[in-house]
Image: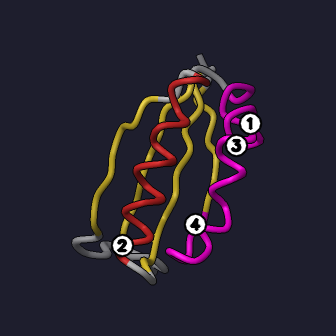
């Protein structure tokens, strides 16, 4: 069952966010993660959007996604993440 990590983002510090994004991306491969999308909000078609950007990473399954998120390599980046941006992080599973 494929799983997706979705982060919606409002950047607080552009330089720190670029550093965080680069360093976080380097942690994906060890858990089978592949970046799918990184983009900016263009318009809200319905409802409300709390953040201005989005990042989506595909993992082989929810266990791999959970292992990545709990990994020492990623956890070490959380203080930088929190300084760089306000984020909402969610995981989605796609049935086989």
The local secondary structure at tag 1 comes to helix
Q: Mark 4 sits on what residue?
A: 81
Q: Nearer the viewer, residue 65 or 23?
A: 23
Q: Which of marks 4 and 2 is in front?
A: 2
Which stretch appears magenta?
62-88
Residue at the spot 65% in from the left edge and 46% down from the top edge: 74
Residue at the spot 22% in from the left edge and 71% down from the top edge: 42
* Mark carried by residue 69: 3
The local secondary structure at tag 2 comes to helix
User: How many numbered callouts?
Assistant: 4
* Mark carried by residue 15: 2
The crowding category of the residue bearing disc 4, from other C-alpha atoms within 10 Å (few below 14, some 14 to 19, many at least 20), is many
Query: Picture coordinates of residue 32 (x, y %)?
Result: 54, 21
Q: Is the magenta stretch mostly helix, strand or loop?
A: helix
Query: Picture coordinates of residue 75 (x, y %)?
Result: 72, 50
Q: Distance between the residues labelled 3 and 1?
A: 5 Å
Q: Distance between the residues labelled 4 and 2?
A: 11 Å
Q: Nearer the viewer, residue 76 or 68?
A: 76
Q: Which of marks 4 and 1 is in front?
A: 4
The crowding category of the residue bearing disc 3, from other C-alpha atoms within 10 Å (few below 14, some 14 to 19, many at least 20), is some
The answer to which of marks 4 and 2 sits earlier in the sequence is: 2
| Vertical order, 16 against 13 (above or below) | above
The answer to if 77 sits in the magenta stretch is yes
Residue at the spot 58% in from the left edge and 20% down from the top edge: 60
The answer to which of marks 2 and 1 sits earlier in the sequence is: 2
The answer to which of marks 4 and 1 sits earlier in the sequence is: 1
The local secondary structure at tag 3 comes to helix
Q: Mark 1 sits on what residue?
A: 66
The answer to if 81 sits in the magenta stretch is yes
Query: Picture coordinates of residue 47 (x, y %)?
Result: 45, 78
Left or right for 47, reference 37: right
């Amino acid at each position: 069952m494929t799983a997706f990590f979705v982060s919606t983002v409002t950047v607080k510090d552009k330089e720190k966010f670029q550093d965080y994004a680069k360093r976080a991306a380097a942690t994906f491969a060890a858990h089978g993660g592949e970046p799918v999308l990184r983009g900016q909000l263009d318009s809200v078609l319905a409802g409300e959007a709390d953040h201005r950007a989005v990042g989506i990473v595909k993992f082989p399954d929810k266990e791999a996604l959970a292992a990545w998120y709990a990994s020492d390599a990623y956890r070490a980046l959380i203080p930088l993440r929190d300084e760089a941006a306000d984020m909402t992080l969610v995981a989605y599973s796609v049935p086989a």
